[in-house]
Image (cartoon, helix red, strand yellow):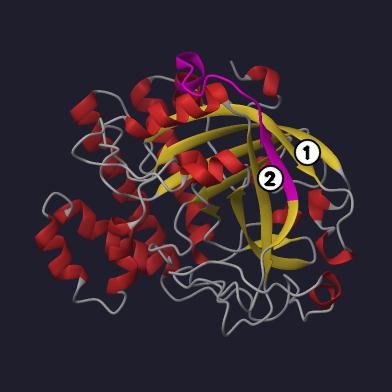
Amino acid sequence: MDISNKGVDDEAKLADRPYIRWDAEGVEKIPENEEEDIKAVAEMINTIQKAQWNNHRHCYSGTHARTQGVVKGKLVVHDDLPKHLKQSMFDHGAEYPVVCRYSSEPGDPGLDDRIPQPRGFAMKVFNVTGDFLPSGAGIPTQDIEFNSTPALDLADAKTTREIIDLRINYGSNQPELYKRLEARPDTALQKYRDTVRNTHLESTRQYSQTAYRFGAYVAKYCLVPSSATQRALYDETVKPDTHTPDILSKWLQNFHRDHDATYLLQFQLLENLDDQPVEYAGKVWDPEKYPWQTVATLEVPKQDSFDYEMKNFWEDHIRVDPWHGLETLRPLGGPNRLRRVVYPVSSGLRRKMNAREEVNVKTLAEVP
């Protein structure tokens, strides 16, 4: 999956492209039986959580269970954006405090770092103002989540139900799992997760995978490591024979102890619904046709990225949910409608089994 961005048009041409409005006809089309599929997925995620509780006597989230690090920083919105990028909370130059979590995507908190798998990045942005989605009313944060693969293998509710079922039944037997995946038309998408580049987390590009409202328009977003050190470290990969099972969190801790980190937050706008599906997240929006455009910079100063108090507070009390945020950054498409149901169900089981309360932090000062 080549996601490089080459030959980007100049700014004037980018401003004049036929971007599609978020409320245009056909942007969202709810398929038949989606509600049933979503309900089934929520039950499956709880099944995975209960299995992990039985192993660890502690309940984790159904995905992204392994925390690799938690850091604080600021999101700096550029004050010289062209008009078509001045959308939602990015309509003026500003600085927002943030707290961010690096993770491994599967639901096993004990997953060996030497096993290639997608990695995650989540960000809570504070001091946000505007009209919030109903589930995030009264919580002045914008939750933003990322994954290291540009396409989402759980591409819609039906696919998610089928794939989660296969992983529950055959996840411990890869040959048997692959036999069933190879009978599917989306074999390459489903097997891609096992071939991802296993490298430094602070050097890994991250993607929204799914589409969101972007003010007047629709977009996907990504986070691009931009410092020279981060880019250089991308060349180093995990060596299963010589590295330890926690090598990714060790690398991350060493990096953040000695270096500042910078990331570019970029958006890719919707122009062609046939070529850039919103309902199906298993297709990459070709960056050669639809360029990434930078709107902000994430700055993370030197710090301990594996503070035990902050890690445990996040795992025990915090939920990142894209439905906690602004109406003008509303999640779109089937996978996001699934998240609107599944995330609260998953979080509710975690709090019940761990005897912990969910804490909707409103300021960075509330995070240890």
User: Quadrant of residue 62 in the image?
Assistant: top left
| Residue 365 sits above or below residue 346 on the image | above
| Residue 100 sits above or below residue 17 on the image | above
**CA gap, disc 2 to disc 1?**
8 Å
Count of marks overlaid on the render: 2
Circles 2, 1 touching at the beta carbon (< 8 Å): yes
Q: Position of residue 47 (x, y in %)?
A: 26, 44
Residue 10 located left or right of residue 343:
right
- Give the quarter of the figure containing the C terminus: top right
In the image, which residues are magenta?
296-311
Residue 32 located left or right of residue 164:
right
Q: Disc 1 designates what residue? A: 128
Please check the rendered image and state whether residue 308 is part of the magenta-colored stretch, yes or no: yes
Tag 2: residue type?
A: Gly
Residue 135 located left or right of residue 293:
left
Q: Disc 2 designates what residue? A: 325
Tag 1: residue type?
A: Val
Disc 1 element: loop
Q: Nearer the viewer, residue 93 or 27?
A: 93
